[in-house]
Image: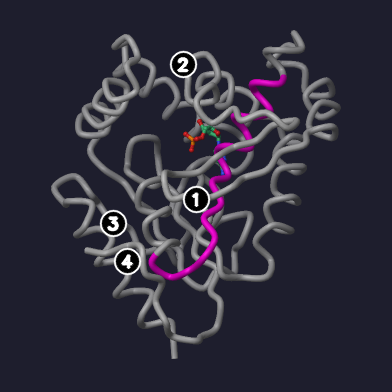
Amino acid sequence: MNDHSPDPRPSRKLIIAIDGPAGAGKSTIASRLARKLGYVNLESGAMYRALALKAIENDISLDDEAGLLNLAEDLRIKLEPTMGGNRTVLDGQDVSSRIRERDVTEAASRVSVHPKVREWMVAHQRAMGAGGGVVMEGRDIGTKVFPDADLKIFLDADPVVREQRRRQQQKIRGEVAANVAAELRERDHRDRTRAISPLVPAEDAVVIDSTSMSEDEVLQKIEELVNHKLP
Ligand code: DC
């Protein structure tokens, strides 16, 4: 499948929401889909990760909601889609790799439980995607950020498969294999049970279980759904 030539159809610019737990394949699929459609891929998790990194660097407690909000208000973050994936630039510095590391990953899940932090994120995410022509991925895009999104996908997979995929990603990045299963389960639990905007499929989301599907199959299925939404 060639992802590099955007679909030539002139059409309405949709808002496509892809939510789901860690390791379900959201990032890869969202970025490939955006490239195919000539859309922008906005990875909302990168914003939580960038804030978490800033909190770590500034010694702000991950439990200090007011302190985190202050940091967020100063956040200069750019999400730049590139052919090789999404680049995240924080205060002028490329932090794309750093924000994937384990400490930031855990911290991102912790900063995301705070209602005021979420409000700030949601407002900015709405502003970034409002014009359409976006594939935005995260946990609450279909439920909270864009409840009227044109298409909502909830991408899930069996936890064992998600753990395997995470291990594989770590290996590719040359990271020391950590206790992937426990960390993933803990993060899942926190993301699914937090009081504000927990990870749940929107009522009108199409749930895709990618456990035994290839990336190409998932992409094809979503493209079919997109085609139904386009004139
Ligand atoms: O998608 P990700 O793994 O990069 O997200 C990192 C953390 O950010 C995730 O554990 C929960 C939080 N998050 C969120 O609460 N809402 C989003 N829309 C995206 C991410």
Neighbour class for label 4 at 10 Å: few (<14), some, many (≥20)?
many
Quarter occupied by residue 35: bottom left
Mark 4 vs 3, N-terminal side: 3
Q: Earlier in the sequence, mark 1 or mark 3?
A: 1
For disc 1, the marked residue is 137
Question: Which residue lies at the image location 71% right of the left edge and 18% below the top edge?
Answer: 55
Where is residue 134? Give x, y as percent: 55, 64
Residue picked out by circle 4: 222
Nearest to viewer (mark 3 / mark 2): 2
**Residue 57, position as x, y percentages in the image:** 71, 12
SS of the residue at dot 2?
helix
Residues under numbered marks 3 and 2 in contact, where contact means CB atoms less than 8 Å apart? no
Identify the disc placed on residue 173: none
- Amino acid type, label 3: Ile
Which residue carries the number 3 mark?
Answer: 208
Magenta extent: 36-54
Distance, label 1 to label 2, CA atoms, is: 20 Å
Report the residue marked by disc 2.
102
- Percent of width and height locating residue 58: 76, 12
